[in-house]
Each structure stands twice: as C-alpha cells, then as structure tokens.
C-alpha cells in the first residue's frame, strides 16, 4: 500500500513538471534528448576512406547546422579519452585569432576532427606551413581551408598602416592583398572606414595566402596536384555565422 502511494505521488510530480513546461511554451526534456549523440573520434581507417571533396561536404553540412542552431551533441569527456593515443583529423583550418570565430563550432566538429592554426590575419609563414605539412603529409588530413572573416581587425590595421611593436611586421604579411588593389581600377575609398574595401582586401588576402601555400610548400603543392588534398578559401560572416567558400 505504501509502495503504491509512493508511485502515485511520483507520477503526480512528473505530470506537474511536464504540464508546467508545456504551459511555458517549452518542450519537456526527456533523458534521451539530453544524451550526447557522438561518443567516438575519427579513426585512421575512417580518415583513409575520406576524400577531400567528402571532407569539404562535411564542413559545409556542419556550418549549415551551426547557422541553424542544430549542432551535434557530443560526449567530450569520452572523446578526450578516446583521442589520447592518436589523432586523425579530416582537415586543417588556418584562421584568424579573432575570438568571434570559434572554428570547431563554426563547422560543428568535435575533438579530433580538425587541426586549427591561428594567427591575426590568417596568413601563412614557415611555422604554419610546417604545421600544414604535418597535418596533411604525416597525419593524413585531406583539406586545407584558409578561413578569413568580415570586419577583421588585422586587415583594417594593415590598410591603415598601423605601426606598433611586433604588430608592424606581422601586418606586413597582409600588404600584398592591399597592393593588389593599387594595380586595379578600383577607385573607392581605400581606408578601413570603407567596409566594402575591407571585405575585398580580406578576401584577396585569402587568395594570396592560398597561392603562397602552393609557392612555399612543394610538399603541399604536389599533394594537391596528385589529388591527395584540396586547398580552399572561405569567408566567415560575423552576422550570420555562415561560411562562403571562395571560387564556388
């Protein structure tokens, strides 16, 4: 009798919680909906089966989920343990350091999915090229993505000729993208106050970086020519979270 009464009280409490959530316009949370959907990390066998086109498709699909707010739930604690003895990421992303561009989140990727290199202005240098060669030639990544973004402070600083400590030579890496427009018929305002010009320089900086990767890394250039990897560029929209892939 006492057991039946306890069960009745429990049922009434649960019903009250469900009805309360519904009256507030919320869906009741079930134990299954709270469980992580992804427990594992990418294996070498899974990485080997992927092509660069398939990896690019996965990043696009992940970005669509990020934009729509339907990102994948993951068991990060288990993924950390599973990834401890090895990593086989799908791609390496070269991004700006901007804190508003959370690379793994932008592509709805988890632990062990991506290599990420970051530097203000997302340009390449010897260290980053070496990191890319490690990611692709040694660790088997199938895609290099140079990811720029709107309203980039490094691009604006390079446009305006900012000089301050080590920032000065760093911004020098973006100068070729600015000089590109000195050789064109562009007649608009060439300052950081012109958002259209900032966008143009940021996009050109991605193209310059891609060409420099091919120029200064014979290893990566050969891998691309052999169809082992793909080298792409993308622009992240701060307002929408959407990534536009250049050349498509």
Image (cartoon, rainbow, N blue to C red):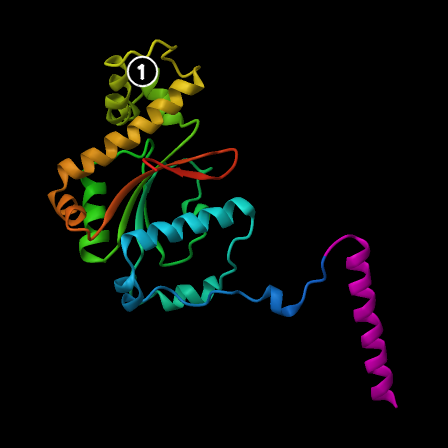
Residue 104 visible within the image: no
Residue range corresponding to the magenta coloring: 1-26
Residue 91 visible within the image: yes
> Which quadrant of the figure has residue 177?
top left
Q: Which quarter shows the C terminus?
A: top left
Q: Residue at x 20, y 53 (%)?
A: 228
Q: Residue at x 31, y 18 (%)?
A: 163
The prevailing secondary structure element of the residues shown in magenta is helix
Query: Judging from the image, what secondary structure is the residue with disc 1 in?
Result: loop
Where in the figure is residue 63, as x and y percent of width and height? 45, 47
Q: Is 154 situated above or below 105?
A: above
Q: Is 63 situated above or below 210?
A: below
Residue at the limit of the structure toward the bottom, as seen here: 1
Where in the figure is residue 186, as x and y percent of width and height? 32, 12
Q: Is residue 5 magenta?
A: yes
Q: Which of 156/209 is in front?
A: 209
Q: Is residue 221 left or right of residue 238?
A: left
């Amino acid at each position: 009798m006492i057991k039946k009464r306890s069960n009745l009280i429990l049922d009434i409490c649960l019903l009250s919680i469900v009805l309360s959530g519904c009256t507030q316009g919320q869906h009741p949370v079930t134990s299954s909906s709270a469980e992580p959907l992804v427990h594992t990390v990418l294996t070498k066998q899974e990485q080997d089966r992927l092509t660069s086109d398939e990896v690019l498709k996965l990043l696009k699909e992940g970005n669509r989920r990020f934009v729509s707010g339907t990102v994948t739930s993951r068991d990060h604690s288990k993924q950390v343990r599973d990834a401890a003895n090895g990593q086989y990421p799908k791609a390496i992303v070269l991004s700006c350091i901007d804190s508003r561009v959370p690379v793994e989140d932008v592509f709805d990727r988890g632990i062990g999915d991506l290599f990420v290199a970051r530097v203000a202005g997302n340009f390449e240098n010897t260290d980053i090229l070496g990191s890319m060669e490690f990611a692709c030639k040694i660790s088997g990544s199938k895609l290099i993505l140079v990811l720029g973004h709107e309203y980039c402070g490094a691009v604006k600083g390079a446009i305006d000729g900012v000089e301050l400590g080590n920032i000065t030579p760093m911004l020098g890496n973006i100068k070729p993208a600015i000089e590109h427009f000195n050789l064109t018929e562009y007649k608009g305002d060439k300052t950081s106050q012109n958002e259209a010009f900032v966008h143009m320089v940021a996009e050109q900086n991605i193209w310059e970086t891609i060409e420099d990767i091919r120029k200064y890394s014979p290893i990566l250039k050969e891998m691309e020519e052999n169809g082992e990897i793909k080298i792409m560029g993308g622009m992240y929209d701060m307002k929408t979270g959407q990534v536009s892939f250049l050349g498509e």
